[in-house]
Amino acid sequence: MLKLLIPILDQKGALEAARHSAFLFAEHCVSEVEIVEVLDDLGHDRSAAFHSPGALRRIEKKAMKNALLQTRAILDDAGVPYTWTRVCGPAERIIASYAQKGQADIVVLDASGLGFFRKWAVLARLRRLLPTPVTLIQ
């Protein structure tokens, strides 16, 4: 049985990855899912000039809360056992460290909300950092 890692990178969540995981769980291929909610580093865009880091973090957490709730609801409805964590930092490095630390067999990345260039940049970095297979769902 496989252990999956589902990263949530944006406000759209990881709905397709959760649906895919629920299907694999129903087919008795998956034993456990780990969800990692990745919040961006603050101060990399122009909003840091106008808002405090605490205010920016609160805004981001509020926006990501809905994405996390929807993703968790899909897994709850299917009865999939999962754990979730919220982490701040560079997405690719965090995903790689959690995949290796949690001994995930597959990383399932929902890229439907990512732009074209970010999607392929994230995938290229993950393939370079991880020995674990990465499944990109669009």
Image: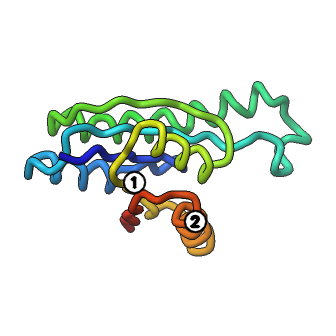
Q: In this view, does 62 lie above or below 125?
A: above
Please rate how many residues cluster around mark 1, counting C-alpha atoms within 10 Å: few if below 14, some from 14 to 19, many from 20. many
**Residue at mark 2:** 128
Q: Quadrant of residue 34?
A: top left
**Residue at mark 1:** 107
Q: Nearer the viewer, mark 1 or mark 2?
A: 2
Amino acid type, mark 2: Arg
Closer-to-camera residue (132/114)? 132
Q: In this view, does 115 lie above or below 51?
A: below
Q: Position of residue 35 (x, y in %)?
A: 40, 38
Query: Circle 2 sits in a helix, a strand or a loop, which is it?
Result: helix
Residue at 85% in and 41% down = 48
Residue at 38% in and 33% down = 69
Closer-to-camera residue (102/6)? 102
Please rate how many residues cluster around mark 2, counting C-alpha atoms within 10 Å: few if below 14, some from 14 to 19, many from 20. few
Q: In this view, does 108 lie above or below 30?
A: below
Q: Position of residue 72 (x, y in %)?
A: 32, 35
Q: Earlier in the sequence, mark 1 or mark 2?
A: 1
Residue at 47% in and 44% down = 100
